[in-house]
Image (cartoon, rainbow, N blue to C red):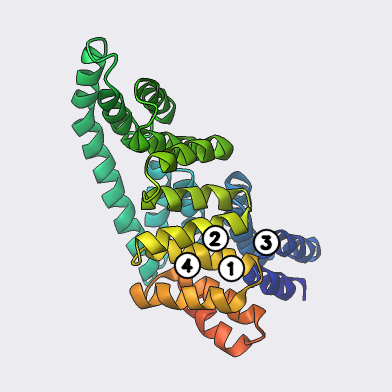
Amino acid sequence: MYYRLGNEVYEAEKFEDAINYYNKALEINPRYEKALYNKSLALACLERYDESIAVIDKLLSINSLFAEAYYVKGLAYEYQNKLEEALPLYEKALLLKPVLDNVRKRLDALKAKLDKKKTGENKYDPVIEYYKKTAEKKMFDPLFWNNYGTVLAIKERYLEASDCFEKALRYRPSYPEAAYNLGRCMSYRGLYEESLNYYNIALMGNPNFEMVWYEKGRALMAQKRWSEALACFTRCIELMPDHAEAYLSRAICYFELKKNEESLRDLDKVLEMQPENEDAWYHKGLVLSSMGRPEEAAKYYRKFFDTPAKIPR
């Protein structure tokens, strides 16, 4: 009973409640494999990746042949940007169950990402060395510092990149691109208030900078400021009508604000542009369920959950 209740609230995106129900199921049977598996998914949805991995490790100690468990553990590592750790876990999942096509796609994508990262490391190292050597000569050149910061950000060296973008703004206070780049670095570092300040500076210089509106909306979403985020995505869509991610993000805001019809409209727009968008499937199921249309919701939940170990983002 508790396991079933956990699944119901999980589908409603109430992950804390789901974890509580799975824990109750596990009190009755500590070796309940499906409860452990779904608990790990719920923890991952809350970005509690280390806890998710610990639960998966317990599951694998009970059943080392549970293929999907290796996949979930791989996802938890990948979402923490621990790509090398994720790779063998996806491979293990496929070794145990070769029919998991979604895992195969994820593995192929991860290999491509690792190849690109390796190529990028080799590609940008000499560029960074050039910037280091010429920094003193270009000390007062804002374009130099913006370009230097961009390369460092590509390498995910966000603290050093932030310093470069700050210098660009010091020498050209009205520099929308540098302010935008600095805002993104702050967001990557989880400093959302700071990121919002820089996005606002960018918009003062260029009110029609569509990607600033999108990233500002994302930063507001991270703070659960749904109405403000919605306004940002709306402006982004006005400037870039084919921005599917802006429609998806706005749909989530509408849902959080209990505006289901508007949310559904935006999700349909996403699926019109990207019919295989898995997050749109999931959120459409969520909205339809909230509207009391369970049969229609089930159709989209099935599309989402029929692929193994999906974690909504």
Q: Secondary structure at mark 4?
A: helix
Q: Position of residue 274 (x, y in %)?
A: 35, 72
Residue depicted at 38% across the width and 29% down the height = 157
Residue placed furthest toward the top: 136
Q: Position of residue 192 (x, y in %)?
A: 56, 40
Q: Which residue is mark 4?
A: 279
Tell me which amino acid carries mark 1: Tyr
Mark 2 and 1 residues: CB-CB less than 8 Å, in contact?
yes
Q: Nearer the viewer, mark 2 or mark 3?
A: 2
Q: Which residue is mark 2?
A: 230
Q: Which residue is mark 3?
A: 15
Q: Nearer the viewer, mark 1 or mark 4?
A: 1
Q: Position of residue 16 (x, y in %)?
A: 72, 58
Residue 225 shown left or right of residue 4 in the figure: left
Task: Say if 264 sits above or below 190 in the image.
Answer: below
Q: Secondary structure at mark 2?
A: helix
Residue depicted at 34% across the width and 57% down the height = 107
Q: Residues within 10 Å of mark 1 (few under 14, many from 20)?
A: many
Mark 3 and 4 residues: CB-CB less than 8 Å, in contact?
no
Q: Which residue is mark 1?
A: 254
Q: Nearer the viewer, mark 4 or mark 2?
A: 2
Nearer-the-camera pick, 296 or 186: 186
Q: Position of residue 100 (x, y in %)?
A: 39, 69
Q: Residues within 10 Å of mark 2 (few under 14, many from 20)?
A: many
Tell me which amino acid carries mark 2: Leu
Tell me which amino acid carries mark 4: Asp
| Earlier-in-chain disc, 2 versus 1 | 2
